[in-house]
Image: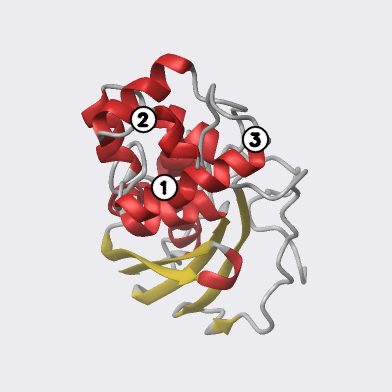
Amino acid sequence: MAGRLTHLDDTGAARMVDVSAKDATEREAVAEAIVVLSPEAFAAVRDGNAPKGDVLATARIAGIMAAKKTAELIPLCHPLALSNANIAFEWIEERNAIRIEALAKTTGQTGVEMEALTAASVAALTIYDMVKAIDKAAVIEAIRLVRKSGGKSGNYRATAKPAPAVRRSAKPTILMSEVSAPRPGPDAQREAFRAFMTSQRLRATDWAKSAGVPTAQIYAFLTGRSRALSQDVAERLARAARVRVEDMFK
């Protein structure tokens, strides 16, 4: 019957499809996912300043591992001997987004679409995990099959790109932390703090480490999740930068 779901038997019960009669052919699939970040999180990933370390290197390994374990995650998938699995990234500067492209290849009796899709999905989730200390509102969108080749169904290529999701945000996120200092307002203090970091060429991770404070406290202020740095944190940062507290907010 045309359009019949092959993972259901005649009684409607789920089953693994018997592919033993199929010819082994070379098969390839490419899937994508897009992760939309705040400006601060995007900059942290690009500049290598994320609290947990190298975001893309970790996401690449996670995606490759996920491709190899797809049959353990998706109940009715066949275990496949992959001949190649790879993850590539593309910066989408105008959206503060990262496009993930996952490739899977095998020579076998069934396709590798699920392996590619699983790899893209897990790589995207890993990026979220690596940046959630900075940006819990990061959005994973547009997980889809881009193209596939091989097998009885032949080649497939996606046509138009899906419309980008609109990231919901109550207000624009800004950099920096607020402290007990002159009070022109938290947004103005963040801007002044950002300008201070830029002028002093201070990287959040290195500065926090030298001051003995959690990097997440700087990022929380920079992204607006924290209204102020505590007096103790501000004083530690000022000592590490060899300035007065008020100099960080001029």
On the picture, is 209 further left or further right than 151? left
Binning the other alpha carbons within 10 Å of mark 2 as few (below 14), some (14 to 19) or many (20 upward) gives few
Q: Secondary structure at mark 3?
A: helix
Which amino acid, by three-letter code, is at mark 1?
Phe
From the viewer's perspective, is residue 169 above or below residue 32? above
Cα–Cα span, label 1 and label 2: 12 Å
Q: Which mark is residue 244?
A: 2
Binning the other alpha carbons within 10 Å of mark 3 as few (below 14), some (14 to 19) or many (20 upward) gives some
From the viewer's perspective, is residue 225 above or below residue 135? above
CB-based contact (under 8 Å), mark 2 and mark 3: no
Residue drawn at 61 percent across, 31 percent down: 225
Image quadrant occupied by the N terminus: bottom right
Q: Which residue position is annotated with label 1?
A: 196
Toward the viewer: 210 or 231?
231
Q: Quadrant of residue 87?
A: bottom left
Q: Which mark is residue 186?
A: 3
Viewer can see residue 78:
no
N-term-proximal mark, 1 vs 2 = 1
**Residue 142, how many percent across, how many down?**
64, 62
Which amino acid, by three-letter code, is at mark 2?
Arg
On the picture, is 175 further left or further right than 84? right
N-term-proximal mark, 1 vs 3 = 3
Q: Secondary structure at mark 2?
A: loop
